[in-house]
Amino acid sequence: MIAGHSLLAARKSAAASYIVPCLAVTVALFGGLSLLEDVLQRSLLQEGGVIETISALLYVVAIAVLLPAFRAVWPFVTLLAVFSMREFDLDKQLFTEGLFKSRQFVGDTVPISERVVSLAILLVIVVSIVFVLARGLRGLPRRLREGDGVLLCVLLGSALAFTSKLADGFGRKLAEFGIIITEGVDLAALTYEEIGELGMALSFLIAAYAFIRLFNAEHVGHHTAEIME
């Protein structure tokens, strides 16, 4: 039993190394895209383009990885589904005004039935966020000290999400303060936005992979302990 706990602890610590490929791939993609011609670069970064499609598919793979542990991680799976839906623009295509637009819930352009469904989906999303935060903050200092790989990958993905959001419409935001940036800087900001979102998806996928390995190891350990008893 002691050996089983030691093995599990070792796997948690080893999982911290998963953050390295996340960073390496994200940096390499940003650098590689930046070397391309502007026209080709923008075509890859456009809405519904190659980069967004890859990001969406990474979320789908992450969901598939977590399905065996769905009952334990359904809030995370729910949020991954939302992220994938946004990358595929389904939040706009499947709803009259857009699931995350205030116009979806006010005015007379949206049928009552659709509005009720939209509210129900938002409620599930909010509940999922609350559960994710509650679980994520539990034992946070200890998990950081132990180098919990799942947590580190999730934190990296969250940081990339935050910074890529800052890069979204970077030129437009600065223009509001009278600051005009060059086309090259604007393209670099767009590149970072899309690659940051892809890095976020990759980080969550690797976090899902690290988690399911630990989940399976834990269940094998419990099963072995029951047999030995």
Image (cartoon, rainbow, N blue to C red):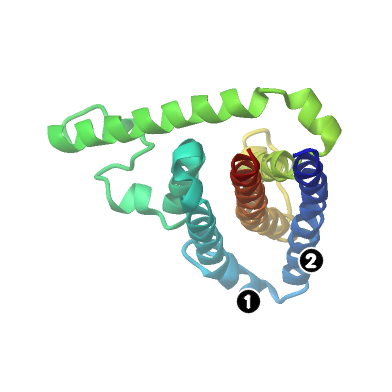
Residue type at mark 2 is: Ala
**Residue 98: % across, % down:** 33, 43
Q: Is residue 213 visible?
A: yes
Residue that appears at 44% across and 39% down: 71
Residue that appears at 62% across and 35% down: 176
Specify the quadrant of the image occupied by residue 222.
Answer: top right
Q: Is 225 left or right of 185, judged from the image as shown?
A: left
Q: Nearer the viewer, residue 154 or 40?
A: 154
Task: Estimate how packed mark 2 is, as few (under 14), some (14 to 19) or many (20 or more) residues with alpha carbons within 10 Å.
Answer: few
- Quadrant (top left, top right, bottom left, bottom right) of the N terminus: top right
* Residue assigned mark 2: 28
* Element under disc 2: helix
| Vertical position of residue 143 compared to residue 19: above or below | above
| Vertical position of residue 112 compared to residue 69: above or below | above
**Residue 90: % across, % down:** 36, 53
* Element under disc 1: helix
Q: Nearer the viewer, residue 182 or 193?
A: 193
What is the distance, in whole Å, between disc 1 and disc 2 at their CAs?
A: 17 Å
- Quadrant (top left, top right, bottom left, bottom right) of the C terminus: top right
Q: Is 84 left or right of 147, judged from the image as shown?
A: left
Residue that appears at 55% across and 66% down: 54
**Residue 179: % across, % down:** 72, 40
Residue that appears at 42% across and 58% down: 88
Residue type at mark 1 is: Leu
**Residue 214: % across, % down:** 67, 47
Task: Estimate how packed mark 1 is, as few (under 14), some (14 to 19) or many (20 or more) residues with alpha carbons within 10 Å.
Answer: few
N-terminal-most mark, 1 or 2: 2
Q: Which mark is residue 40?
A: 1
- The number of numbered discs placed on residues in the rendered structure image is 2
